[in-house]
Image (spheres, helix red, strand yellow):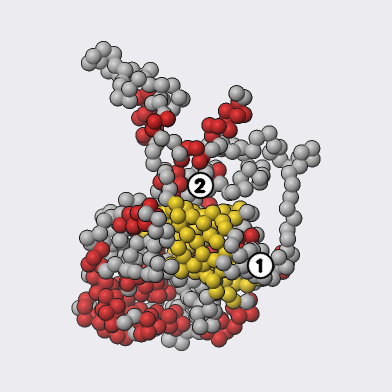
Amino acid sequence: TSFASHVANQFTSYEKDRQMSSKQAIYATSNGAPQAHPYETQRAGDNGPLLLQDFHLIDLLTHFDRERIPERVVHAKGSGAHGFFECTNPIPDLCMADLFAEKGKKCPITVRFSTVGGESGSHDCARDPRGFAVKFRTEQGNWDMVANNTPVFFLRDPAKFPEFIHTQKRDPSTHLTHADDSTMFWDYLSQNPESIHQVMILMGDRGIPDGYRKMHGYSGHAFKLVNKDGDWVYVQIHFKSQQGTGFITQEDSASKSPDYSQKDLYEAIQRGDYPKWDVKIQIATPKQAEEMWEKQRINVFDLTHVWPQSQFPLKKIGEFTLNENAINYFAEIEQVAFSPSHLVPGIEPSADPVLQSRLFSYHDTHLHRVGANYQQLPVNAARTAYKFGNFQRDGPMAFYNQGARPNYLSSIDPIQFERRKVDPDKTHGHFIGQAVAFLSEIRPEDFKAPRALWQKVFDEPARERLISNAAGKMSLCKDKEILKRQIAIFREVDDDIATRLEKATGIKGYDGIADLKFNGTHNGMAKGAKN
Ligand code: HEM
């Protein structure tokens, strides 16, 4: 057979790779040469040293030495599966993306769930947010929704992210995590009060969800949906578990398997009990977004805040089902590479500065973690992989290198263009201003939603669990000043929380945060400060 059909047979059929059984294979070195036995080595005589000519052994050891790719710097421990999205309530009036165009339309997906702070072998039942990333393989390329199981996040100033993450990981000197020493953990949080809403969720029942099937997902950020006329709205995207939600208490978490969530998800799919989520959106027109700021001081570009569901009700647009486990975990889940910048026509980022930073960071980390051609791996390749082209060529592992096509914009063999469908002047506001530096300030509104959690959402046993979880974590902090500050932040939410924590920890917190400075900078709530 020709070289072309040989290549087609050997390399381009990932499906074939997935179906391979040991019975079909003859043990061989990586260049395909059969080897008499896997355990043989070549020696100079019975007791002599090994021979450099023994490619089998060298092949074995060198490949083993390279088995690890860098683990994700965050969200390193995860689980995933494949499935499909189905549009139940089309929204062509709001969005031109093909996956929302028609009722019943399906789109293949891959989902990866994760914890955030721990390493790739860490415990599934950690008190931590959970990642919830979905790759939608639409007809116009891949759209990744890289979400969490909480509607808000710890910060709204993107430059804080790397430091924040450092404080939730190992101490550079003792190499201990906050499971043993929570000093850095609370030091960061007590200096950055805008984290309090997320801290309340983390210390509350949702801090340890009962596996991945029983939790919701949230975009957190506002995104823009654009229709074919160029009209657009802001949306928050929610994934609502049809399994309901569940949690594990701190006490019970100790007796669970380190791979509790992996086992739960894998086994449910194996037995045909396929988990499902509704996809819902909250919609705000640009005008409503402005009003939200003017009347309620909720900035749609601030992901420490949520949009009230009474004003912005959830609208279902579709649902997704996970009905297929990965056959090869590494190829299909470890190497899957999500990025908020993987967007398709009809879905655009908002100006949320944290989202804007993420648009850069994920692609950058994949170039480092997986390599320059990460988008060519079967799990990452767009459904349209063989239909689209560009002028990117070569680099490590370029197995889909666009053949004989010119690697520049040729006049002899020009690539086709799909013209822009909508007027960019219409979809992109004109951003004009003199801002060169931006750091958010603390506002009274930052404490409203956490207060509602404490007063209206949590019942008394849930409040008691939060106090016990937070006090337990605080008992591992070596610096009293940090805890006094953190209790003051809880006091801004509700005096009751602070008083109960004071009792549980034996530490008297500050009366409030008005006289405190944070990170050495201005605190918007300081007495006499302008908001
Ligand atoms: C993973 C950066 C905020 C959700 C990651 C990774 C990086 C990163 C570098 C590792 C990706 C990989 O190696 O595959 C950042 C930065 C942030 C930020 C710089 C803020 C400035 C957020 C927020 C959310 C989020 C706000 C959720 C709303 C996730 C998820 C993953 C992840 C779900 C795991 C994806 C997977 O399963 O592969 N982040 N992140 N991150 N991040 Fe973020």
Q: Left or right: 308 with respect to 447?
A: right
Between disc 1 and disc 2, the foreground one is 1
Q: Position of residue 13 (x, y in %)?
A: 54, 38
Amino acid carrying mark 1 in the image: Pro
Characterize the local packing of mark 1: few (<14), some (14-19) or many (20 or more) Cα atoms within 10 angstroms.
some
Does dot 2 land on a helix, a strand or a loop? loop
Residue found 47% across the figure and 59% down from its top: 321
Residue found 54% across the figure and 34% down from its top: 11
Examine the rendering and report whether any part of residue 414 can be seen.
Answer: yes
Residue 451 location, quadrant: bottom left
**Figure quadrant of the N terminus:** top right
Residue assigned mark 2: 379
Residue found 42% across the figure and 50% down from its top: 325
Does dot 1 land on a helix, a strand or a loop? loop
Amino acid carrying mark 2 in the image: Val
- Mark 1 vs mark 2: which is more N-terminal? 1
The relative height of residue 491 versus residue 19 in the rendered view (above or below) is below
Q: Position of residue 100 (x, y in %)?
A: 61, 64
Distance from label 1 to label 2 (Cα)?
28 Å
Q: Residue most toward the front?
A: 272
Q: Residue most toward the right?
A: 411
Closer to the camera in the image, 262 or 465: 262
Characterize the local packing of mark 2: few (<14), some (14-19) or many (20 or more) Cα atoms within 10 angstroms.
many
Question: Do the numbered discs 1 and 2 sit on residues whose CB atoms are within 8 Å?
Answer: no
Residue found 49% across the figure and 67% down from its top: 278
Tell me how many marks there are: 2
Q: Position of residue 340 (x, y in %)?
A: 54, 59
Residue assigned mark 1: 92
Q: Residue most toward the top?
A: 45
